[in-house]
Image: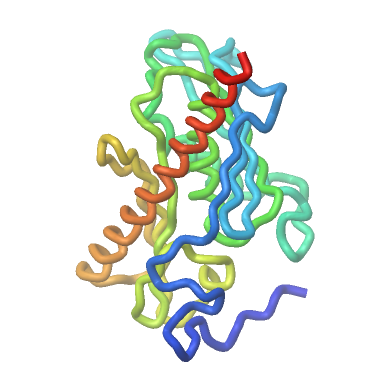
């Protein structure tokens, strides 16, 4: 049976049901190089989300008709495991998975120098092991780290985070229960290149005023800044350990 939503999202003391303040991220843990057979990989544990991304390439494009003589291409496959949600998910890729694959691809393309790899592809495979809201943003964070772990040139990392509005209040990093709450709700996934101050993804589901939109965007950018620092620290930790081991 689907999990029953709570009767309210905010506690009497104004905090969210999980004890977070409106502008507080869920716990985040990042590990780099988790797949030994991939050219680059990362695992992101964001709240109850468990997401693994593996990156491969640059390599020859298959099928060949997808190749472009003047640039490389980025191909992303996002999949949710059948056991990743409460109700067993069909193993066949659904419309939402195809949409998120495209969203992640477009969010990441601006950081890559694809023009340096004509007739080639860089492939990213994302597997959601457990899902608890915000998987597209956490997948962008994980995929960007997998690309960085490959060692290819990048303009910047990409950081994903979602912000929403419930009962007229903006909140950062929605959990699954918060994401499904319908009373006065809005959801806005954002991906950003923090170093270059460029937004590579911005979607909005729901209605907000211009003032609310600006407040939500600023909250998302502040949250992304914290995740970005953790991304860099995770990469430093891996490569420092490799240098020590040599």
- Of residues 3 and 92, the one drawn nearer to the viewer in this rendering: 3
**Residue drawn at x 63%, y 45% as measured from the top left:** 51
Q: Which quadrant does the C terminus fall into?
A: top right
Q: Is residue 37 above or below residue 77?
A: above
| Residue 115 coordinates in the image, percent (x, y) | 37, 14
**Residue drawn at x 67%, y 32% as measured from the top left:** 34
Q: Is residue 80 above or below residue 238?
A: below
The answer to whether any part of residue 84 appears in the image is: yes
Q: Quadrant of residue 72?
A: top left
**Residue drawn at x 53%, y 36% as measured from the top left:** 143
Q: Is residue 231 above or below residue 62?
A: below
| Residue 195 coordinates in the image, percent (x, y) | 29, 36
| Residue 136 coordinates in the image, percent (x, y) | 52, 49
| Residue 47 coordinates in the image, percent (x, y) | 58, 59
- Of residues 24 and 10, the one drawn nearer to the viewer in this rendering: 24
Tag count = 0
Point out the residue furthest to the left here: 211
């Amino acid at each position: 049976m689907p999990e029953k939503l709570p009767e309210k999202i905010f506690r009497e003391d104004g905090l969210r049901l999980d004890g977070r303040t409106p502008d507080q991220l869920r716990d985040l843990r990042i590990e780099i190089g988790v797949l030994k057979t991939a050219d680059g990989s990362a695992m992101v544990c964001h709240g109850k989300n468990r997401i693994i991304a593996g990156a491969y390439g640059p390599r020859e494009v298959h099928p060949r008709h997808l190749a472009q003589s003047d640039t490389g291409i980025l191909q992303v496959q996002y999949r949710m495991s059948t056991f990743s949600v409460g109700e067993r998910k069909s193993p066949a890729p659904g419309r939402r998975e195809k949409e998120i694959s495209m969203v992640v691809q477009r969010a990441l393309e601006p950081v890559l120098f694809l023009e340096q790899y004509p007739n080639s592809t860089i492939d990213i495979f994302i597997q959601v092991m457990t899902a608890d809201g915000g998987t597209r943003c956490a997948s962008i964070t994980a995929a960007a780290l997998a690309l960085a772990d490959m060692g290819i040139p990048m303009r910047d990392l990409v950081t994903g985070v979602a912000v929403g509005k419930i009962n007229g209040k903006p909140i950062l990093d929605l959990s699954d229960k918060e994401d499904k709450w319908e009373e006065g709700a809005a959801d806005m996934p954002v991906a950003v290149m923090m170093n270059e101050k460029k937004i590579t993804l911005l979607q909005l589901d729901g209605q907000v005023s211009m003032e609310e939109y600006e407040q939500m965007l600023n909250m998302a950018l502040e949250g992304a800044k914290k995740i970005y620092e953790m991304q860099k620290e995770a990469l430093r930790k891996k490569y420092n350990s490799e240098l020590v081991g040599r």
